[in-house]
Every structure is written in structure tokens, then in C-alpha cells.
Image (cartoon, rainbow, N blue to C red):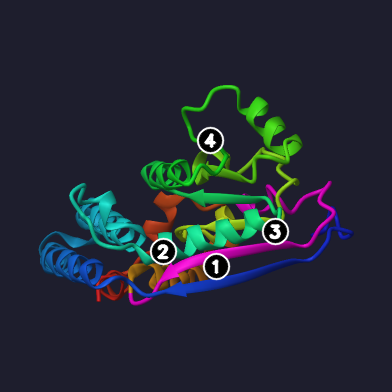
Amino acid sequence: EQVAPELPPRTERIVYTDMDAAQKKLYAQTREKYRAELLGLIESDGMNDARFKILEGLLRLRQIAIHPALVDKKYKGEAPKFEILLETLETLQAENHKALIFSQFVETLKLVKKELDARKIKYMYLDGKTQNRQAKVDEFQTNAAIPFFLISLKAGGVGLNLTAAEYVIHLDPWWNPAVEMQASDRAHRIGQTKPVFIYKIIARDTVEEKILLLQEKKRALVKNIISNEASFFKSLTKDDVKALFE
């Protein structure tokens, strides 16, 4: 904002979706399992010793909120978050827009790849194992026939210039809001001439909503410390953990 005040506007919007019935059931079962284990563990061993189990439980709940197939390969039900994503991408493609799609989970991006392949929709892909990153960036920037770029948040959240895109979609929220902002800045940076639209797709009544609340609560911490996941978890209290698994 300070370096490039002439940048076009950016608009952020949270898009809420409800979970499918089978998804809700799996989510509730998983939440109860970890909640029972964690509260006992925190009482007996304290917060420090419970951290790995907290991380594991939150990881599973976050994955189920995105798509239950991430934790259960046999899952055959619907994943409304994916339905909204694919409907949005089809609309953007029809209107000749380009979009960046971010997820923290490589397995999520692979599921999106599978859906796009089935629809014969072209895209670029980048995660931590991707070679020739710059060639992929250049292809996306210059080839109008490639509307979408699937990017792992950790691998592509910084250092890429992707101003050909004017839409950014976050499939899952990250603890540190600064990390999401840096990822969105791949499109909203010097060289961008169009307004940028940023969508966060959030599953209702899940840990994803709670992450948004914690982002706000911890925003002061994030501003004071260049926060990574470890420092974020050090800031969690027992009440925070209870709330996450409610």
C-alpha cells in the first residue's frame, strides 16, 4: 500500500458454504474423538505436551471441511466447497478472466487438478516440488488460453509476479492472515492494471470459521512478530483449544 499507492482497488469477500450431510457426520465424529482426547491430555500433561495432538486434530478437521476425500479415500459424498469452486471457475473461464487458486494442502490441489482435467480446463500448477517455476509463471502471464494457476500456499505465496490474474481464490484459511495477504499480492502488485477480487471459501460451522475469528484475535500478535505456525501455536490458550474443537 505504501510502495504502490496507484494500484487498482482490491476487494475481499468471504463465500460461505454448508457441508454435505455425510461430510457433517464425519466432521462431528472426528471433532468429538479429538476433543475427548485433547481435554484429558491438556489436564494431565499440560498445553505443551498436547501441541502435536492439537495440530493433528486441527489438520484432520480442516481437511474434512475442504473435502472428506482428503482423510477418507473411499468417500463418495459431495464436497460443496468444490462445487462452488468449480462453478466459479467455469464462470470466470466463460468471461475470459484469469484466477489464482491457493491451498495449503498439495492433496487439495491434486483433487482440483483431477476435476479440471475431467472438464478439459487448462491450468498451470505449482507446489514445493515444481521445477522451472519461472517458465510456468511466464506461460500463465502470456498465454490467454490458460485461465487458472493452482498454487500451494507455502511454495507460491511469495516471490511470484502473476498480474495476468485479477481473481484470487483461497480454498482454506491460514492461521496467519499476513501469509494469505502475501499470496493475494501475487496478483495485486506493481504491473496490475485491473481491480483484483479475492475470495475465501469457508465451510460454515467448522474450524475454518474459528480460524477467521482467531486471525482477528491474533492479528496484533502477527503485527508484532513475523509469525510462523510455531509462534502462533505458542500463543494459543486452553480456552482457544476448547473453542476450536467445539
Find out whether residue 109 is within the magenta segment.
Answer: no
The three-letter amino acid code for the residue at tag 3 is: Glu
207 or 75, nearer to the observer: 75
Could you tell me which quadrant the N terminus lies in? bottom right
SS at badge 2: helix
Give the SS element for disc 3. Answer: loop
Q: How far apart are marks 1 and 3 (CA)?
A: 36 Å
Distance CA(mark 2)–CA(mark 1) = 26 Å
Q: What element carries label 1?
A: helix
* Position of residue 74 in the picture relative to residue 69 (left or right): left
Q: Distance between the residues labelled 2 and 4?
A: 21 Å
- Disc marking residue 95: 3
The residue that mark 1 highlights is: 219
* For marks 2 and 4 on the same chain, the one whose residue lies earlier in the sequence: 2
Residue occupied by mark 4: 126
Question: Where's residue 165, x and y in %?
Answer: 70, 50
Q: Where 11 sits versus 164, above or below?
A: below
Highlighted magenta segment, given as a residue range: 182-205
x 20%, y 51%: residue: 72
The residue type indicated by label 2 comes to Lys
CB within 8 Å, label 2 to label 1: no
Q: What residue type is labelled 4?
A: Leu
Callout 4: helix, strand or loop?
Answer: strand
